[in-house]
């Protein structure tokens, strides 16, 4: 578990699973793989096996040990809904999130169909708890079908991570979506993001009443291009949640207002 995450839209990361396999062009320059593979073969290192998919049950208790509420990105180094992660282990991760409900959890996947199937099986009568945010990654127009899968999931808070944005998404129905994060690719071989692709998504969020967060332009490093889009910072979060408030010092879980 990493506190004080450098990721602008979260506070901490929790990785009960590490490692993954590629599923689309958004994975081509995966930062997590690049980091993990540096340590392949280093005896005793957490990434001794590089980016091979690994279940880490010893990490399941970590969120319960943090008494101060945090916003936690779940599996920044993997994908909880990878086909090789058993449902029984996904159950254990959700059990922990439900029990340690003083935190907000951000669960992000590219395996959108499995997310919808699992969530709807687990939460049949009521939506997933409001402190468990469920999201999918969308890097180009072809992958935008994941949005429909997410909309089908019985969730309270749904979000999109449009990062890295690799092409024009085009018109998109954002009904049922609470939050959109957008960013360009960073790291070696980063592919550039066209400003008009970013503007199109921002404007659709504005028109459809969806909170918008512009993370980065990307480049050689994540900070290389800055965070300004048309001269402005865009730091939106789901309605009822204000990241600028020091929620980490609150005495109770964040309470999210219903969308109007």
Image: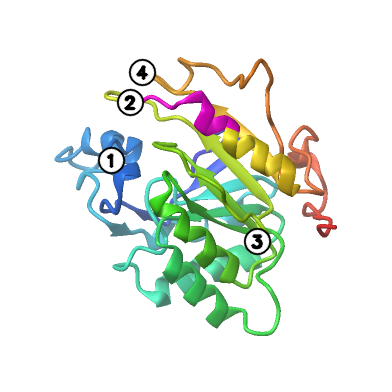
Q: Is disc 2 placed on a helix, strand or loop?
A: loop
Q: Is residue 233 left or right of residue 221?
A: right
Instruction: Give the label, 4 or 3, closer to the camera.
Output: 4
Horizontal and vertical percent position of residue 114? 42, 70
Dot 1: element:
helix
Label 4 vs 3, first from the N-terminus: 3
Find residue 190 and name its label. Answer: 2
Q: Nearer the viewer, mark 3 or mark 2?
A: 2
Label 4 – label 1 distance at C-alpha: 16 Å
**Label 1, label 3: how many angstroms apart (C-alpha)?**
29 Å
Question: Badges 4 and 2: C-beta atoms under 8 Å apart?
Answer: yes
Question: How far is the residue under mark 3 from the one under mark 2?
Answer: 37 Å
User: Residue 214 vs residue 86: left or right?
Assistant: right
- Is label 4 or label 1 in front? 4
Mark nearer the N terminus (1 vs 3): 1
Residue found at x 43% / y 27%: 193
Q: Which residue is mark 1?
A: 33
Question: How are the colours assigned in the image?
Answer: rainbow
**Residue position marked by numbered label 4 in the rendering:** 220
Question: What stretch of residues is rendered in magenta?
Answer: 190-199
Residue marked by disc 3: 100
Badge 3 crowding class, 10 Å Cα cut-off, few under 14, some 14 to 19, many 20 or more, is many
Mark 1 or 2: the one toward you: 2
Front-lying residue, 60 or 104: 104
Quadrant for the C terminus, please. Answer: bottom right
Q: Earlier in the sequence, mark 3 or mark 2?
A: 3
Choose the circle earlier in sequence order: 4 or 1.
1
- Dot in front, 1 or 3: 1
Q: Is residue 44 magenta?
A: no
């Amino acid at each position: 578990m990493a506190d004080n995450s450098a990721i602008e839209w979260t506070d901490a990361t929790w990785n009960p699973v590490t490692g993954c396999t590629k599923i689309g062009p958004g994975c081509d320059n995966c930062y997590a793989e690049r980091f993990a593979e540096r340590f392949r073969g280093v005896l005793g290192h957490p990434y001794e096996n590089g980016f091979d998919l690994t279940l880490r049950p010893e990490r399941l208790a970590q969120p319960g040990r943090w008494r101060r509420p945090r916003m936690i990105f779940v599996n920044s180094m993997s994908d909880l809904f990878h086909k090789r992660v058993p449902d029984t282990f996904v159950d254990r991760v959700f059990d922990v999130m439900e029990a340690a409900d003083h935190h907000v959890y951000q669960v992000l996947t590219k395996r959108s169909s499995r997310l919808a199937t699992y969530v709807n099986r687990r939460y049949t009568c009521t939506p997933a708890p409001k402190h468990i945010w469920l999201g999918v990654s969308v890097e180009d127009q072809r992958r935008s079908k994941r949005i429909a899968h997410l909309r089908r999931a019985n969730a309270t808070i749904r979000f999109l991570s449009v990062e890295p944005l690799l092409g024009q998404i085009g018109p998109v129905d954002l009904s049922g979506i609470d939050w959109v994060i957008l960013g360009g690719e960073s790291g070696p071989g980063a592919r550039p993001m066209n400003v008009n692709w970013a503007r199109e998504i921002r404007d659709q969020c504005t028109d459809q009443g969806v909170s918008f967060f512009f993370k980065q332009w990307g480049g050689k490093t994540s900070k290389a291009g800055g965070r300004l889009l048309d001269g402005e910072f865009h730091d939106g979060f789901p309605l009822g949640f204000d990241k600028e408030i020091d929620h980490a010092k609150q005495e109770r879980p964040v309470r999210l207002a219903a969308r109007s």
